[in-house]
């Protein structure tokens, strides 16, 4: 055997040793996490309810009977609320007017407050003629992606069915430190302890990840780190709050372009996650729980 063969054999041995070490570490973590929690996504429950001809509450009850233990709620944007008919948007030469179909004054005031929190430098006011929010000098396309609420009726159903609530806040291009805190305060106010961020970025990415970490800690929340489908800013956030980071082993299907998780089937067709409550080994930098 010449020197080249010896060098190649040595490289193979080093790679094998590294693989064994990583595998042993993962086995140790999995053995330490034996308690599993199943989390079903509210959007998937709605779709399943429509497909089966049943109501949302009845479909949710069936999923709970099948083993679901928590409900994940996404933070809805203005565009999504308009598309669902919950809000009405009107563009004028002066800006954008937003109202509700039933012209409910309390809902409009809450909406104005949420928008101002998300866009602290925007000119947000109330119409003097009818219950509506007025954003001066801003077109709707400029604010369409702004997240403003977790749907209260979904949170109420989670409570009614004794399911824990998981919040899915959304990062958006104009996010500010004030918006980071407002979003996470809404999550905590809705009753969530665990947050798993929507889409491809953690809240606050790129510049405000430290603010997100501080607010997660301040509000006594847990952060769901998605292992299979990485999000921008996830390593930075997890490294700042390792004691509050949980592992997400299987992201929701809608975060992966609608594809089913590996293995094919999900209970009732709804995207599921699971959480293990046993602590991870001390050497793991990703916290105390597992979500999969």
Image (spheres, grey):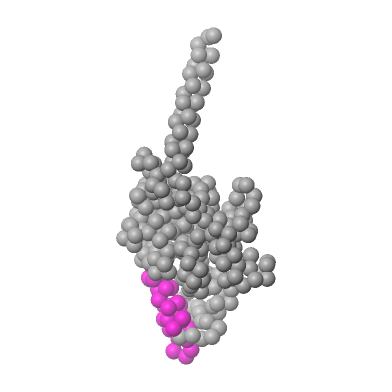
Is 12 rendered above or below residue 199? above
Q: Nearer the viewer, residue 259 or 174?
A: 259
Q: Residue furthest bottom?
A: 129
- Return the x and y of residue 251 as percentages of the image width and height: 53, 52
The answer to whether residue 221 is left or right of residue 89 is left
Q: Is residue 142 visible?
A: no
The residue shown at (58%, 59%) is 66
- Return the x and y of residue 156 as percentages of the image width and height: 48, 72
The image quadrant of residue 31 is top left
Stretch of the chain drawn in magenta: 106-135
Q: Is residue 117 visible?
A: yes
Is 198 inside the magenta-drawn segment? no
The residue shown at (46%, 50%) is 35
Dividing the image into 4 quarters, which one contains the N terminus? top right
The residue shown at (36%, 48%) is 242
- Return the x and y of residue 5 as percentages of the image width and height: 53, 14
The image quadrant of residue 183 is bottom left
- Return the x and y of residue 244 as percentages of the image width and height: 37, 52
Q: Nearer the viewer, residue 215 or 261?
A: 261
Is 81 rendered above or below residue 109? above
The image quadrant of residue 113 is bottom left
Is 114 inside the magenta-drawn segment? yes
Is 242 rendered above or below residue 89? above
């Amino acid at each position: 055997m010449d020197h080249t063969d010896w060098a190649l054999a040595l490289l193979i041995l080093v790679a094998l040793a590294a693989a064994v070490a990583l595998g042993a570490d993962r086995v140790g973590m999995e053995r330490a996490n034996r308690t599993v929690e199943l989390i079903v996504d509210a959007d998937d429950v709605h779709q399943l309810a429509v497909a089966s001809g049943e109501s949302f509450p009845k479909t949710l009850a069936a999923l709970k009977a099948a083993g679901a233990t928590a409900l994940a709620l996404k933070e809805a944007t203005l565009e999504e609320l308009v598309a669902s008919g919950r809000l009405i948007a009107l563009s004028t030469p002066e800006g954008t007017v937003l109202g509700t179909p039933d012209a409910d004054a309390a809902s409009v005031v809450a909406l104005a407050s949420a928008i101002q929190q998300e866009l602290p430098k925007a000119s947000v006011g109330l119409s003097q003629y009818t219950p509506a929010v007025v954003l001066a000098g801003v077109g709707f396309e400029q604010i369409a992606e702004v997240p403003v609420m977790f749907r209260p009726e979904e949170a109420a159903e989670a409570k009614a069915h004794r399911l824990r609530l998981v919040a899915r806040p959304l990062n958006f291009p104009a996010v500010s430190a004030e918006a980071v805190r407002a979003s996470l305060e809404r999550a905590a106010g809705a009753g969530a302890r665990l947050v798993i961020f929507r889409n491809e970025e953690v809240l606050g990415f790129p510049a405000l990840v430290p603010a997100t970490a501080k607010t997660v800690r301040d509000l006594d929340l847990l952060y769901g780190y998605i292992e299979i489908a990485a999000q921008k800013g996830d390593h930075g956030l997890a490294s700042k709050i390792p004691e509050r980071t949980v592992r997400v082993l299987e992201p929701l299907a809608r975060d992966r372009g609608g594809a089913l998780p590996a293995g094919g089937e999900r209970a009732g067709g709804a995207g599921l996650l699971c959480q293990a409550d046993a602590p991870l080994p001390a050497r793991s930098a990703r916290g105390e729980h597992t979500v999969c």
